[in-house]
Amino acid sequence: MTSAESRGVRLETEAVGFRYSGKTALEDISLRVEPGEVVGLLGPNGSGKSTLIRILSGILPHYEGAARVDGAEVRTTRRRDLASKLAVVPQETSFGFPFTVLETVLMGRHPHLAGLAFETQQDVELARAALDRCGVAHLADRTIQELSSGERQRVVFARALAQEPRALLLDEPTSFLDIRHQTELYDLVRELAIADGTAVLTVLHDLNLAAEYCDRIYLLRQGRRAAAGPTDEVLTYANLTAVFETEVYVDTNHLTGQLLVVPLSGRVRRELAGKDPETP
Amino acid sequence: MRSSEPLTQGRLLAWTLVLGAALALSVLLGVAWGTSSLSLVDLLPGGPPLSEQARAVFVDVRLPRVLAAAVLGGALSVAGVVFQALLRNPLADPYVLGVSGGASIGGVLALLLGLGGAASLLGELAVPAFAFLGALGALFLIEWVATVGGKLTVYTVLLTGAIFNAFAAALIYFIQTIASLEQLHAIVFYLMGSVPLLGYRGVGLLAAASVLATVALLSMARDYNALTIGEEGAAQLGVDVERIKRRTFVLGSLLTGLAVSVAGLIGFVGLVVPHLLRLLLGPDHRLLLPAALLGGGSFLVLADLVARVVVAPGELPVGVVTALVGGPFFLSLLRRRGARYDFS
């Protein structure tokens, strides 16, 4: 998977645990993302996915166990050094000030610039290239506040690209994107993994996207690991119904040979159960 | 004007020169225009010699006062810019974080105790010294309350500041009710805010402190840009968020405390000037901070000029002028651009 000119770095955790004011959010999580891999982090709401992303990105330094980016322990790494290797795309970003799209993407150069330095022409070209790759080059001069949430999210992804990251953490980045832009963004993620050897850890709710784009999956439930392994071994009827505590229909996508998962509504679940006392 | 291109050193330099020239022009105007007739022509070298009285008006009264207005306006505007960045809200002003309440208590107490007169031990320095002590006290109190688990929580700072300001206002009302009529007059006038007569040494100290604080804040300008996307996002871009927040809170509060100590509560400067400059120049703090120092100076020099001449030979507190001009202006701005501040 790793290409010859890979500049990717490994992400790993060893027996990581985390408590929010005494309450356990994560316990004994060990995972590893090698350069060039796209690894999915799946699980129900509140299962600790975002907590793990925040630990790896240095936001929650009081974790137990070890969390390393490029072999360096996250809690003792300087923010700048971490940010020059690792970019994060959150689910949503709020913008309180009217920066232009280009200025917003240039913020991705922050960890690479010294103290008071101004962005060079090279930085600007890098930012424009990132906008182009994300299909939002035409928005460069608009202010970020004027954009739709889907457009904003692509700008945020362009900012992450401008950071020239060697590893990427994505926290449900496509929640606000339509199906075309969902696939375009993950196509780009794949391309980064293959061409640059970027290590990608992504939180996903869309199981079909996960099936299509992830090499491996970690399935979390109540802060603990429920299953881990190659995508087709983890995304099974038994695992999904147990972890998400709902019924799903699992089939094969005959076009791609990948898994096809459809969550079932209460109506269908009741019909399957053969009795429906609530309907007259 | 607001350029869609990213900021360059060239544009920063150009705007610094333009706003510097505007400040110089405002100072000249402020010096030349006043209740006693003294025109710019009189000041030109080679003109007829100035009378002793005119020289005294110019050198001892008008110039130091105009310079003080320039420094105070700059300091308040810079504090406004950084508090807006810290709170991620372009509608914050330097007084929201409570330091002004502490300074007011100190100043009013000094006036109540009769320490303000020229005959007292500390003389003219008593009121600003007490006020500054009050500002420092408020600063430490608010920082102590709002620090949870080693982190400065911005919303707790804001809330603590608001509560402290309300407490300070109540305390001042209490002092006003027990004060003599003469003291009451001095207290009311102090609180309304006016540009003081400081003397060159005082103005020099104030200017040095303001410029130093601005330079220190300017060194964090790119961090402020990143902070506009939120603390977590900024941290993930490599910003040492806790250090930046704490330094900004302390430096901004010191600037505000200094200004309130010597001039009372001059409102709207720290709100209107940053806001106007952001509209004019864009939100990049590398340009916004020096622009606020210079533009805020011009704004207050001109406001003080108005305060001196409209009801001549009497004089308005400059805080009345800035609020009378700033209030309606700001409302109309909000009416037209309010949609941009929808944070939901």
Image: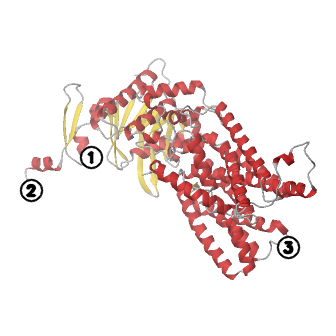
Tag 1 secondary structure = helix
Q: Secondary structure at mark 3?
A: loop
Q: Characterize the local packing of mark 3: few (<14), some (14-19) or many (20 or more) Cα atoms within 10 angstroms.
A: few
Give the foreground label among 1 and 2.
Answer: 2
Badge 2 density bin: few <14, some 14–19, many ≥20, Cα 10 Å: few
Name the quadrant containing residue B312.
bottom right
Have a look at marks 3 and 2 and say if they share a chain. Answer: no
Same chain assignment for discs 1 and 2: yes
Dot 1 or dot 2, earlier in sequence: 1
State the residue at coordinates (22%, 37%): A261
Q: Chain of mark 1?
A: A
x and y percent of residue A67 in the render?
49, 40
Q: Which mark is residue A244?
A: 1
Relative placement, left or right, of B103 versus A99 is right
The residue that label 2 is drawn on is: A279
The residue beneath circle 3 is: B120
Name which residue lies at 13% across and 46% down. A268
